[in-house]
Each structure stands twice: as C-alpha cells, then as structure tokens.
C-alpha cells in the first residue's frame, strides 16, 4: 500500500522511466481511494508537468481538469497568489528597463522561468545581467558573491547594480511581479495545500528558494515522493540545490534498468559519472543492445545522410558555427523549435510551383506567397500581400495563375521556377534551399536537430553528435569546480539511443575530455 510508505526519493538514471514511475504511483493513489484533486505533482518544467498529467489522464481515464495540482512550482505559486498575466513582467517591460539602463534585451524570446543561461547562450546581455540577480535570489546568496563567482568580466558590477535598482523600481511603480516574486510570496504566505499526496519530479533542478516552497507543500500530505537524478543536475547556473535534493528523504531507491542506453554508450556514461564528487551511488543496467561510439576530428566526417540526429553544443553561440556549416552543406535542420527553412517560405515555394503548373491555391496561401515577391518588380505597385484587393478575396474561393495576373497585378512569368519568381528571397537563402531540396529530406520534419546540451535535457535521439568545446567562462569554472561540466556532458552522452558521435577539435584546448 502506497499510503503506508515513508517519504521516498527515487533516483532515476537516464532512460529508467522517472516520469513513468511517478505516473504509476499516482494511479496507485487513485486506486486506493485518494481523490485526484487531492494529489499534487510538481515539476521543474512545463513539459514534464504536462507529460505527467497526460499520462495519468490517459491511463486513468481522467479529464485534465481532474488534476488541478499537476503544475510547475511557478504555476502553483501563480495560482495560489491569485495573480493575473497583466501583473507579470514581460518582454515589453524588459525592453523599457533595458533602454533605461543601456543594456540590450532580446525580447523575441519567451520570458519563461527557464530562459537564462550564464554561459554564453542567453539571447541578450540584459538577460545575462538579470539572470545573476535571479540566481542570487534563488540561491539565497548575495548579489556580490554571485557576480564574483561568474568570472564573466563582460558583466560589470556597476551595470548590474544599476539594472537591479531600475528593475525593482520599475516593478514597484508598475505593480509588476516576476517568477521569483511568486515563489517568495508563496513562502511568505506559508499556507500549505490541502492535499493527501505530493510528488516532486525533476527535483534535482530545484533551487534553494524552490525547496523552501516544497517544504511548505510537504507539511500536510502523508504521501511524499521525490524523483530525480543528481548526476543530471545541470541547472546549477540557475541555482539548483543538489544537496537539498539528496537530503530530501532518508529512504532512497534506484530505478535500475535503462530503456534507452545500449551497453557502449552506458559505459561512456559510467566513465563520466565516476568523476562526479559527492554523488549518490547508483547501480543500474543498460538495455540489451550494443550501440556504437564514434570519434571524429571534423563534422565533415560525420555521416548525417540518414537517420535522426541531435547535434549538441555547450552554448547557442557555438551552435551558430555548426548551423552555418549545415546551411553551407544543404542540410535541413531545426533549432530551438524553428525550422532552418522557414515554414511560410517553403509554403510559398510549393504554392508557386502549384500555380505555375496550372493549379489553384487559396487566398491565404496567395497572400503569403506575395510576401516573397518584390512589389516593384513582381507585382504592380500597390498589389502587395496587404493590398485591399488581395485582403478582400473570398478565403473559400481558389485562385489560379490567370486570376492572379488579371485581377491582382502579378507580373511574374508563370514559366519561371520559384527561385526566379520569388525575388524577395535573398540569393544565399535560395542556394541553401536548392541544395536542401536536392538532398530530398523532409523540410517540415527535419531529421537533424541542433541544440544546446541544456536544451536537450529530457530528450533522446537515435544518433547524437557532441561538440565538447567550452566557452571560456565554463572552462574557467571547470578548473575550480569540475562537477558542473561532468554533469553537463553526462547528460549529453546519455541522450543517445543507438549511436554516439563525438568531435574533438585539434586546436582548441578549451574542451571537455569525454
């Protein structure tokens, strides 16, 4: 009976089914008579929270609203505090703050609780500065100490202090809050939830501040279950408190069988994890398959021509180098959820080919295609994608090439191929798309993904290529505290299901030795 169990921590090595185990235990709770609405399952990321909720609903025959407490800690604090979206500081606010201080915020990225990366992958210097402040709050450590330990001399103390002062003044004046404020408010209020069971997933990634919130949540329920893996604690740059995770319960159980890692890749993972100091010991086994490990001097030697691939770099900046290589070689790939060939552009190409063959397309597709034709050369002046005649077309009535010429001012000869007709696409992009189409890969569902190692956390792929180059800040930190990089590259290696590929550049000394 799960009700009779003492608080427990499940240590789950890669691919051992941590989330699946939590879902099974939640369903046991429901079978033993605990109402679903009295079960809380909190995760570090929205993806993990949604995955747990979906699995329990699917296997338990429940509606999603039957599990109101399957959330991230931030979402739970947001709900408990009765906040509205209008109160939460957003990208527009950050832009105003940045302009006042003289730092740049990349406001095109989402302002989520997990946006910031101190090791060169943050989208703007404003985010890098602000992440220092959020880290000091999450770790409950002074801002001065956090700034000193980063070792990033580009982040100046005077600018950091001015940004923090401006940030807090702005929030106060505009009655705004951020994600850390939500957690602090929950802790300050100190009201535990009226629940019978608490499950905490990805617990190794929780910060000191988040553990204070968990300490409040765990006061009432009889059933308390924590799941995570200290070897995969790679969010320390955001304040993850690994020691708090290991101290969460006295009882620990290791999930012992990996459904992901074959023997050779498991062996590489074991080699890395053995270097981590102070880790919890774990005995676990690979799946019954051999797998392969390959070493390369250059990406040109990597057989990207078939299979599913994830190329993992330490930072987004390094990822850009490999993105440029993939573009030069004509490989289609995705990066941070975006396709290397924009979907709308590819749709315009297909639509032009359809029109030129005498077929018809729908007005919304035609409007999109007009975006890629220069108004002065390809269409009569005033007949761009937002022209009245084009906007007023009946969206349900198809348009052919003749209609586009006669009614909508299209000047481009229908006998031309897309790369001749769509003249608002620059030459380099055209050449890339032409090369990519020659390769014959699925443009909308590319086989190749380019990601940081942190961005791949929780994921897996048939083939994984690791680039072990380190930015200077990470290399410097590794010399002082190697555990961080051991954990990062342990996560990288353990994403591979079949084949692991590793690049070791000859010239650079700032690499992690796998």
Image: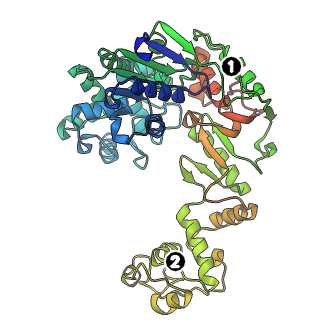
Q: Mark 1 points at which residue?
A: 272
The reply to whether residue 143 is visible in this rendering is no
Instruction: Answer few, some or many: residues within 10 Å of disc 2's Cα (few below 14, many 20 plus, some between 14 and 19).
Output: some
Q: Which of 455 and 141 is in front in this view?
A: 455
Q: Which residue is drawn at 44% across and 79% down?
A: 384
Q: Is residue 342 above or below residue 300?
A: below
Residue 374: mark in rendering: 2
- State which quarter of the image contains the C terminus: top right
The reply to whether residue 488 is visible in this rendering is yes
Q: Label 1's element? A: helix
Q: Where is residue 18 in the image (x, y as percent from the top left)?
A: 54, 26
Q: Where is residue 393 in the image (x, y as percent from the top left)?
A: 40, 82
Q: Where is residue 197 in the image (x, y as percent from the top left)?
A: 36, 21
Numbered disc in front, either 2 or 1: 1
Q: Label 2's element? A: loop
Q: Where is residue 75 in the image (x, y as percent from the top left)?
A: 33, 34
68 vs 512, left or right, is left
Q: Nearer the viewer, residue 318 or 500?
A: 500
Q: Residue at x 67, y 41 (%)?
A: 311
Q: Nearer the viewer, residue 42 or 464?
A: 42
Q: Which of 27 and 122 is in front in this view?
A: 27
């Amino acid at each position: 009976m799960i009700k009779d169990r003492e608080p427990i921590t499940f240590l789950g090595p890669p691919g051992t089914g941590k989330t699946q185990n939590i879902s099974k235990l939640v369903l046991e709770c429901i079978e033993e008579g605990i109402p679903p609405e009295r079960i809380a399952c909190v995760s570090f990321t929205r993806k993990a929270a949604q995955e747990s909720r979906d699995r329990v609903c699917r296997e338990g025959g429940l509606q999603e609203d039957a599990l109101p407490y399957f959330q991230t800690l931030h979402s739970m604090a947001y709900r408990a505090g009765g906040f509205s979206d209008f109160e939460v500081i957003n990208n527009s606010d950050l832009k105003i703050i940045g302009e006042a201080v003289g730092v740049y915020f990349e406001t095109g990225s989402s302002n989520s609780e997990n946006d910031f990366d101190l090791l060169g992958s943050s989208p703007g210097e404003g985010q890098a500065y602000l992440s220092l402040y959020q880290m000091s709050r999450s770790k409950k450590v002074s801002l001065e100490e956090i700034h000193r330990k980063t070792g990033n001399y580009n982040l100046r103390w005077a600018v950091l202090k001015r940004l923090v002062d401006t940030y807090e003044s702005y929030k106060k004046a505009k009655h705004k809050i951020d994600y850390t404020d939500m957690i602090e408010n929950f802790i300050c209020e100190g009201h535990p939830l009226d629940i019978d069971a608490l499950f905490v997933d990805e617990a190794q990634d929780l910060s000191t501040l988040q553990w204070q919130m968990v300490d409040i949540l765990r006061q009432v329920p009889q059933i308390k279950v924590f799941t995570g893996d200290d070897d995969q604690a790679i969010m320390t740059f955001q304040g993850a408190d690994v020691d708090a995770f290991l101290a969460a319960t006295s009882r620990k159980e290791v999930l012992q069988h990996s459904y992901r890692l074959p023997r050779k890749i498991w062996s590489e993972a074991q080699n890395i994890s053995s270097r981590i100091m102070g880790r919890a010991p774990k005995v676990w086994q690979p799946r019954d398959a051999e797998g392969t490990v390959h070493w390369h001097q250059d990406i040109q030697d990597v057989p990207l021509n078939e299979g599913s691939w994830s190329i993992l770099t330490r930072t987004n900046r390094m990822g850009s180098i490999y993105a440029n290589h993939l573009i030069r070689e004509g490989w289609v790939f995705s990066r941070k959820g975006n396709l290397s060939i924009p979907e709308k552009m590819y749709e315009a190409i297909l639509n032009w080919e359809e029109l030129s063959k005498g077929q018809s397309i729908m007005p919304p597709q035609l409007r999109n295609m007009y975006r890629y034709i220069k108004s002065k050369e390809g269409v009569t002046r005033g007949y761009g994608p937002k022209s009245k005649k084009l906007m007023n077309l009946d969206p349900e009535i198809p348009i052919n090439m003749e209609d586009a010429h006669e009614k909508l001012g299209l000047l481009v000869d229908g006998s031309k191929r897309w790369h001749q007709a769509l003249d608002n696409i620059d030459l380099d992009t055209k050449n890339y798309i032409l090369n990519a189409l020659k390769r014959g890969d699925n443009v909308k569902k590319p086989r190749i993904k380019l990601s940081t190692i942190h961005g791949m956390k929780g994921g897996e792929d048939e083939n994984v290529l690791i680039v072990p180059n380190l930015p200077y800040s990470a290399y410097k930190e590794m010399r002082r505290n190697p555990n961080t990089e051991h954990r990062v590259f342990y996560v990288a290696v353990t994403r591979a299901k079949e084949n692991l590929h590793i690049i070791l550049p000859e010239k650079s000394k700032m690499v992690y030795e796998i």
